[in-house]
Image: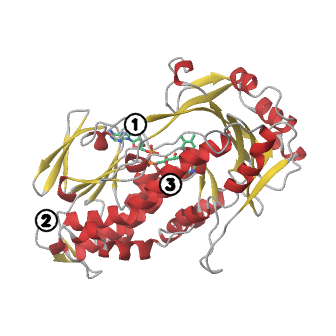
Amino acid sequence: MPVTNGSQFSNGVDVPPNFRVAIVGGGIGGLTVALSIAKYCPGLTAKNISVYEQAAAYTEIGAGISIGISASQVLKKLGVYDAIDKISGHRTSVHRSNHRWDTDEVIVDAPASNSGTQQEEVRQLWLHRAEFLDVLYNEVKRRNCASLETRKRVISLEDRDTSVTIRFADGTEASANLVIGCDGIHSAVRSQFLVDKPVYSGRIAFRGIIPMSAVANDWPYSSWTLSWLAPGKHFLAFGMSQNKLMNVVAFVAKPENELHGLKESWRSEAPRKAIEEEYAGWCPAVQRIIQAMPPVISEWKINDREVLSQWVYMDGKVVLSGDAAHAMLPMQGSGAGLSIEDANILGFAVRDYLSNPDRGLSSYMLQYQAARIHRAQKAQVTSRQAAAVYDMHGPDFEGKSFEECLPVVRDKVQSRMAWLWKVDLEADWAAAKESREVQQQ
Ligand SMILES: Cc1cc2nc3c(=O)[nH]c(=O)nc-3n(C[C@H](O)[C@H](O)[C@H](O)COP(=O)(O)OP(=O)(O)OC[C@H]3O[C@@H](n4cnc5c(N)ncnc54)[C@H](O)[C@@H]3O)c2cc1C
């Protein structure tokens, strides 16, 4: 049902003047959704779009994140790619060089991918999360395209026919015609409709940042993105911040009963000694990186969520996006990229709703779900498979020695990211319109 009668804006699109969008969560996904809706719906202003972030400021942790080609293309469309490209790390034509944990010999080099015509060309990005979020935040501020609220932890939603009442932990309320849940793996928006919980992956991760200068003078590799693999453990390092810094993530398989209360939290810490012990005996390059890490590093429990078949609730007035919809294991480095792609499609969905509201908000939001859900579900499933490949665990590796595992790893790593990096979001949006899920509404 249309919200109110439309009024004509200068871009020719009818915008119901009181149409309000609430984006819950101001992380990478939430801020990109704000930029995308602003781009595709220029009739909407900061009076129409609000981001509600629970924290006291829009910040990210000091850790690295890689962004695939398809998400880079979205960032280009949203006008932030050049600024983000400038803060990225760089590597060679190798996306990720995978080595043996003991002898340091190459197991397999996974090729990098760039894209597009020369004019459109974008590359994969290797970013410091806090620097990345700063670019997104500053762009929303610069364009004044959304109001950016802080200390607004959403605790509940109530259906009010053509709008939703949003309640915050501080006792205040807001109202919106469309609520987009971008509030991450522990999403409060998702928990309004579902009782599922994050699932432990059987792995923890140590994380830290080192100055690139600590290793750059003795770096005999074909890439700045390397991993070293052993059964049950793998160690990943890549350059970020124009290669001034190196991001380090080291995964260790661990049964849940050995976690001793370890939390899935950006702020959970461990002494460097813990990673030294887990990686004792690994090749000298790994030892040099570990010794350059600070005395206190972070240690995390790695979780994901089960695949979800519904992202649209309250007759299309509430939708899920990013980790709230499809939290996945980090082994393919794709969760944030998919949240950026979601944002692009949500921009199309709100644009098309505003230009033809008679079809009903629900129909456009189901079209968003149809355009995105199968790709996201596949990424969730294949991220679990990738975790098993890098750890040499599961049916493909059962009963095999380390040496026998290596050809299997080689086979499964080489081109596993190709489908994830290639997506035509415009075509997916058009195809979703024809899909049964949307037609049935
Ligand atoms: C170890 C690790 C490595 C990773 N590496 C990569 C990588 O290299 N590449 C990649 O693409 N992805 C990677 N990911 C995944 C990536 O971090 C997530 O997919 C991405 O951060 C999801 O973005 P989001 O905005 O949906 O959620 P989040 O980043 O979790 O942001 C959610 C936001 O919502 C806010 N919030 C939460 N609850 C509420 C509430 N109730 N009310 C208001 N605000 C709320 C939070 O404070 C936060 O700001 C990695 C993940 C992990 C764990």
* Residue where numbered disc 1 is placed: 56
* Residue where numbered disc 3 is placed: 379
In-front residue for pair 190/217: 190
Q: Which amino acid does label 2 sit on?
A: Val
Q: Residue at x 77, y 46 (%)?
A: 406
Secondary structure of residue under mark 1: loop
Check if mark 3's residue and mark 1's residue have beta carbons within 8 Å.
no
* Left or right of residue 353: residue 115: right
Q: Give the quarter of the image for residue 371.
A: bottom left
Location of residue 53 with respect to 343 vertically, above or below = above
Report crowding for label 3: few under 14, some 14 to 19, many 20 or more residues within 10 A (C-alpha): many
In-front residue for pair 345/388: 388
Q: What residue type is labelled 3?
A: Ala
* Residue where numbered disc 2 is placed: 3
Instruction: Tell me residue 352's x, y (percent).
Output: 28, 74
Mark 3 to mark 1 CA distance (whole Å): 32 Å
Give the quarter of the figure containing the C terminus. bottom left
Label placed on residue 299: none
Secondary structure of residue under mark 3: helix
Q: Which residue is drawn at 39% across and 59% down?
A: 373
Instruction: Tell me residue 263's x, y (percent).
Output: 49, 26
